[in-house]
Amino acid sequence: MEYTLVLIIHLLSAIIFIGFIFADVIVFPAVKNKLGEEFHTKMIEAIVGRGLKIYPPIVLILIGTGGYMFTKYINSEVGALNSSLQVALLIKVFFVLLIVLGVIYTMYCKFTKKEPIAFMNYFHTYALILGIAIVILAKLMFVV
């Protein structure tokens, strides 16, 4: 039952995390095109204001619950590369680490008011693609 509760919390956090990124990559640009730059700017300011309060705890919950579930399938007793499930899980973890490093770098740039490297201008697009890949791997790792 404990694992199931952690799984539900993890899934809800992932929905919020990927949903926000999806909105930023797909929905918000459509609003900008339809309703103009001024409305878009005000909308983004309002959303980012709330997002900065919600997003960091969601990321921490996502990482914490994911780490907890990770230990069920990869540990000293069951090994690390003994099954295709474990290989898929390690690929997922690699993708997660890429996203986490991007989030840390983005937060660092925001707090220090430094300009991020040009590659990071498309970070949410990369994170969305990685997030979708993580979801697909999560489903496939139990059937492969």
Image: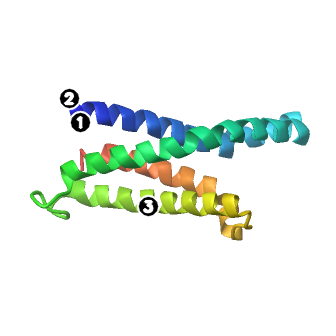
Q: CA distance from mark 1 to mark 2?
A: 5 Å
Say which residue label 2 marks: 1
Q: Position of residue 143 (x, y in %)?
A: 24, 45
Q: CA distance from mark 3 to mark 1?
A: 22 Å
Q: Earlier in the sequence, mark 3 or mark 2?
A: 2
Say which residue label 3 marks: 97
The circle on residue 3 is 1
Task: Name which quarter of the figure residue 84 lies in.
Answer: bottom left
Q: Secondary structure at mark 1?
A: helix
- Give the position of the N terminus as an image quadrant: top left
Of 108 and 123, nearer the camera is: 108
Of 44 and 33, nearer the camera is: 44
Q: Is residue 103 above or below residue 25?
A: below
Q: Secondary structure at mark 2?
A: loop
**Local crowd at mark 1 within 10 Å, few (<14), some, or many (≥20)?**
few
For the question of whether residue 30 can be seen, the reply is: no
Q: Secondary structure at mark 3?
A: helix
Do the numbered discs 3 and 1 sit on residues whose CB atoms are within 8 Å?
no
Q: Amino acid at mark 1?
A: Tyr
Of 39 and 134, nearer the camera is: 39
Q: CA distance from mark 3 to mark 2?
A: 28 Å
Residue at the location (79% across, 35% down)? 43
Residue at the location (20% across, 56% down)? 74
Q: Earlier in the sequence, mark 3 or mark 1?
A: 1
Do the numbered discs 1 and 2 sit on residues whose CB atoms are within 8 Å?
yes
Q: How is the image coloured?
A: rainbow
Task: Name which quarter of the figure residue 24 lies in.
Answer: top right
